[in-house]
Image (spheres, rainbow, N blue to C red):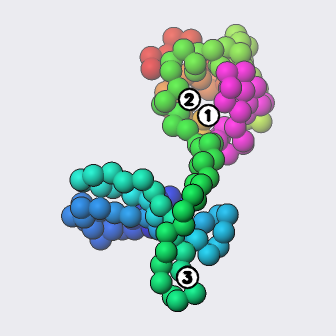
């Protein structure tokens, strides 16, 4: 597995995924270090419910009955393209209005305020990526040292 995500590593990992009937992910429980959680990543046949096991005093694995899996934390990352065009328009209108925002830090502040107004509060790194995305899509246009919202963009 890659360190940053749940994908298998490299071209060999990809080929193993392509050929495998079932790919399981076994991880140590966040709740109890003696328990391992087993979940299916890819299955070509029948799905199964995740389960947990521990190694008993006889060095044998045993199922942990009534184990409650923690719900995954809400993913703070989101694809910028998963927002609807109208959501982008509303956020940019709220953040920029009709004015030209001068200075990069003010642009980031305008993006932060605009996207927070539609429920997407994000940190600086995401906002920097968002700015690049919006400029590439011509949703905001750079004019000299300032940026302005371009309501005539095509999504």
The quadrant of the picture occupied by the C terminus is top left
Query: Which residue is the site of mark 2?
Result: 134
**Residue 129 vs residue 11: left or right?**
right
State the quadrant of the N terminus.
Answer: bottom left
Residue at position x 51%, y 11% from top? 152
**Circle 3 is placed at which residue position?**
56
Q: Nearer the viewer, mark 3 or mark 1?
A: 3
Up the image or down, 132 lies above or below 37; here it is above
Alpha carbons under labels 3 and 1: distance apart = 53 Å
- Could you tell me if the residues under marks 3 and 2 are in contact, i.e. CB atoms within 8 Å? no
Residue plotted at (48% across, 78% down): 61
**Circles 1, 2 touching at the beta carbon (< 8 Å):** yes
Question: Is residue 12 visible to the viewer in this orientation of the structure?
Answer: yes
Depth check: 42 or 138 in front? 42
Image coords of residue 59 (percent x, y): 51, 88
Badge number at residue 25: none
Q: Which residue lies under the disc numbered 1?
A: 131
Which stretch is magenta? 106-128
Residue at left 77%, top 31%?
109
């Amino acid at each position: 597995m890659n360190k940053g995500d749940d994908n298998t590593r490299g071209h060999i990992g990809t080929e193993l995924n392509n050929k495998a009937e079932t790919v399981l992910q076994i991880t140590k429980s966040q709740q109890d270090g003696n328990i391992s959680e087993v979940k299916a990543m890819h299955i070509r046949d029948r799905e199964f419910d995740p389960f947990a096991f521990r190694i008993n005093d006889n060095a044998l694995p045993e199922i942990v009955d009534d184990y409650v899996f923690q719900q995954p934390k809400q993913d703070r990352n989101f694809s910028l393209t998963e927002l609807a065009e109208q959501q982008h328009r509303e956020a940019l209108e709220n953040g920029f209005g009709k004015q030209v925002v001068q200075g990069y830090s003010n642009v980031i502040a305008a993006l932060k305020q605009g996207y927070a107004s539609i429920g997407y509060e994000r940190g600086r790194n995401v906002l920097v990526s968002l700015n690049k995305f919006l400029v590439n899509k011509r949703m905001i246009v750079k004019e000299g040292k300032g940026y302005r919202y371009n309501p005539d963009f095509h999504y």
